[in-house]
Amino acid sequence: MSPQKRKKLSKIRSELDKIDNSLIKIIKKRTFLVKKVLELKDRKNQIVDQKRIRSILSNIRKKSLKNKIDPRITNRIWKNMIWSYIDYERRNFKKK
């Protein structure tokens, strides 16, 4: 790789790092809200809501297409995020 390309690569990676830092802050906010949702659930079987999952993924697909983002990328990201939070809720569910 040429020095010029290496410099461009470094700059792009720096921008990616900034976006990652922003995402971490957003994930922290989302986790806080998921905790609040979990406090409202009475039974463990309320954790997975297939209808809501389908709705979220459908909306993400529409927004992805509208914004010219490959919907396979966003679908995979959101599915992983959803199931990660489901796992989080299952681990943190406190029976009342």
Image: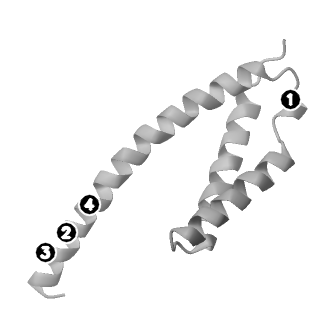
Q: Amino acid at mark 1?
A: Lys
Q: Which mark is residue 10?
A: 2
> Disc 2 and disc 4: Cα gap in Å?
9 Å
- Position above or below: 86 against 15: above
Label 3 SS: helix
Q: Which residue is mark 4?
A: 15
Q: Are marks 3 and 1 in contact (CB under 8 Å)?
A: no
**In this orientation, which residue lies closer to the viewer: 55 or 12?**
55
Q: How is the image coloured?
A: one colour
Q: CA distance from mark 1 to mark 4?
A: 40 Å
Q: Tag 1, which secondary structure?
A: helix
Q: Looking at the rendered structure, which numbered label has been put on residue 7?
A: 3
- Tags 2 and 3 in contact by the CB under 8 Å rule? yes
Left or right placement of residue 5 versus residue 79 in this view: left
- In what quadrant of the picture does the C terminus appear? top right
Instruction: Give the structural element (helix, strand or loop) at label 2.
Output: helix
Q: Earlier in the sequence, mark 3 or mark 1?
A: 3
- What separation in Å lies between label 2 and label 3 (alpha carbons)? 5 Å
Which residue, as the protein is rendered here, is positioned at the far bottom?
2
Q: Quadrant of residue 60?
A: bottom right
Answer with mark 3 or mark 4, whichever residue precedes in sequence: 3
Q: Which residue is mark 1?
A: 44
* x, y percent for residue 31: 57, 33
Cα separation between marks 2 and 1: 46 Å
Residue 8 falls in which quadrant of the image?
Answer: bottom left
- Of mark 2 and mark 4, the one earlier in the sequence is 2
* Residue found at x 22% / y 74%: 9
**Is residue 73 in view from this perspective?**
no
